[in-house]
Amino acid sequence: MTADIAVIAHRGASEDAPEHTLTAYRQAIADGSDALECDVRMTADGHLVCVHDRRVNRTSNGRGAVSSLELADLDELDFGSWKAPAGDEERPDRGEAYALEPERSRVLTLERLLELVAETERPVGLAIETKHPTRWAGRVESRLLEVLAANPVPGPVRVMSFSARSLQRVRAADPALGTVQLMRFLLPRHRDGGLPAGADIAGPSVRVLRRDPGYVARAHRAGHPVHVWTVDDPADVELCARLGVDAVITNRPRTVRDQLRRLA
Ligand code: G3P
Ligand code: CA
């Protein structure tokens, strides 16, 4: 069972490299990840970019909401220097990392990430999270489906969201696309393992499983695979393996993959 658990790199190999950068995703692929997780947000001029927060303040040297900036504005920013390279206590000067290593610092579009996956020799899956609320509402999903149609990749693609509405829009537009209902906690109506219409995979936080380990069996009985986030701690990896989850989403894909192999 353990050997079958898929390892999904959360924002890339984001323990080692700045989250959502091409460097983080290249590292995640080299680390043997089965799939790559990313958050998508829409810019003022309609591009989908891989950024977690509503604003760019935490992960770049800029300020402002992604939805009010154009792609050209984001392209001027440094998304890498806030994070020191692994093993390096000192942060490099802003600008220096960008000049030396643009892939580590440049904003990543979803299209470029799909290109990377398409170029990879083995099939690598994608778990794309739509972030809501946003001023663009349903335009995010329609743009996402357009981008996916224009940039086919060989591995499985799933759309994830905390917003059931977002997943319903995706399901209505493309019933073949896998959908993951993310859950920070279990609503009483979902304790039996059922999911809202439009979702076929359960995406609980690992905290849900710590409190209610029986949830995995109930979701399975209801016909739903279980993808758990964010599973970095060895005790959580062990718990997920013991419960027989289907995928773990982690910031440290190599370490987690190695632990799962040892447990198998
Ligand atoms: O993979 C699901 C997880 O990413 C949801 O939380 O805040 O990291 O996007 P967050
Ligand atoms: Ca996410």
Image: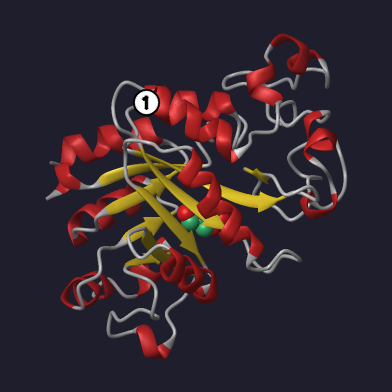
Whether residue 232 appears in this view of the structure is no
User: In this picture, is 9 found above or below 104?
Assistant: below
Q: Which residue lies furthest to the top in this view?
A: 100
Question: Which residue sits at x=65%, y=62%?
Answer: 139
Render colour scheme? secondary structure
Q: Is residue 147 left or right of residue 6?
A: right
Please name whichever residue, 35 or 18, is drawn nearer the observer in this view of the structure.
35
Please name whichever residue, 235 or 35, is drawn nearer the observer in this view of the structure.
35
**x, y percent for residue 76:** 83, 28
Q: Residue furthest right?
A: 63
Q: Mark 1 points at which residue?
A: 31
**x, y percent for residue 119:** 41, 22
Q: Does the residue labelled 1 lie within 8 Å of ligand 1?
A: no
Whether residue 215 appears in this view of the structure is yes
Q: In this view, does 47 lie to the left or right of 244?
A: right
Q: Which residue lies furthest to the bottom in this view?
A: 189
| Residue type, numbered disc 1 | Asp
